[in-house]
Each structure stands twice: as structure tokens, then as C-alpha cells.
Image (cartoon, grey):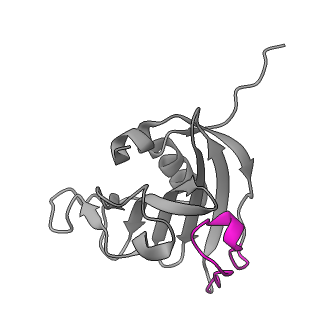
Amino acid sequence: MKIRRIVADRKTVVSDTGWKDDDIPPRYSGVYEKTKPNRNGWRWRSVLAKSAAEEYIFLTQINEASDNWKAWLILKVGGSASIVSRFEYHGSHPGIHVHSHCDLAGREVGPQLINNLVRVPEASSRHRRQQTFRASSFWETARQHFRIEFPKGDLL
């Protein structure tokens, strides 16, 4: 399946950890075999989401003090997981951008696709608007980008 189709696939939240500042257990990232140490100032939030045919992990990592904001869409594949796309913003080189690998994302399992992915738009692009984020505003922006919705309740 193409990355655009994976991202566009409507996903519904099944479980949500809320914001945490401890180390990230493997079950909340899907790609790390061991607990990932969480450095000073970093917070994270992980959501398990499902579409009609797939199961996903939506992992958000933020460091407000250093103006670093990351969100990953991770496709669960059997007993492992594949990073589909990273949605990011860094105050040191502003501009919301995504990282992905058209041929491997959604197929290659494990942590291999964390680094060295194609950036869109390129770093030299003129599309480098500065943003001001807080934890909730970045999380909402990334959640909407990846088409992750909360379950709809019944009307009374």
C-alpha cells in the first residue's frame, strides 16, 4: 500500500496513554525491542488506533524547552511494526515537514526507518514557516495529519 493511502486511511483511537515523561516501553512504540530511555525534558504519548483493515501506533515525542516536536505513524505488521512516516517540527530549522521512504515505509519492520528518510519539503525549501506549539496543539495537528479520530459516541 502506498504511503499516501496509509496516511489517508481513517483510524480510530482504541487506547491512549496520555502524556508521560518516563522511559518508553516497547509496546508503545512497536519498533524498539527494549525500553527506550527518555532524556531530560522529553515527554511522549502513544495511541493505539485501528482502521478497517490495519492496526497502528501513533507515537508523539516532544521537548517544549528545545522546541522539538515529533510524531510517528507506525503500522503494526504481525508481531513487529514498520514506521510509515514521521511528522516533525524543530525550532532550530523551522517548518513542519515529514520524513518517509516510499519504497520501504509500511513494509520494513523494526527501527531501521527511524533515520535517513526523505524529507518533504526539502530543508532548502522556502516553505519554512515558524510555528508556536504547545503539547496539545502539536498533538492535535499531528493527529489530524495522520487521520486519527476519537470514536464517535451514541447520541442520547
Query: In the picture, residue 59 is in which quadrant?
Result: bottom right
Tell which residue pokes out farthest to the top in this image.
156
Residue 45 or residue 36, whichever sits in front: 36
Residue sitting at the far right:
156
Give the quadrant of residue 53: top right
Q: Which residues are magenta?
A: 21-39
Q: Is residue 38 visible?
A: yes
Q: Residue at x 54, y 71 (%)?
A: 64
Q: Name the quadrant of the C terminus.
A: top right
> At which x and y percent is residue 33?
63, 78
Q: Is 147 one of the magenta-colored residues?
A: no
Residue 132 appears in the picture as rendered: no
Residue occupying image coordinates x 52% and y 34%? 10
Determine the image quadrant of residue 52: top right
Q: Residue at x 21, y 68 (%)?
A: 123
Q: Position of residue 126 (x, y in %)?
A: 15, 59
Query: Is residue 119 rendered to the left or right of residue 149?
Result: left
State yes or no: residue 37 in magenta. Answer: yes
**Most frequent secondary structure within the magenta stretch:** loop
Q: Is residue 25 above or below residue 39?
A: above
- Left or right? Give the position of 82 relative to 124: right
Query: Where does the image place residue 79, in percent across and percent down from the top left?
Result: 64, 61
Question: Which sits in the foreground, 82 or 130?
Answer: 82
| Number of marks | 0
Q: Residue 44: where, in percent of width, then height? A: 64, 68
Quarter holding the N terminus is: top left
- Residue at the spot 55% in from the left edge and 69% down from the top edge: 62
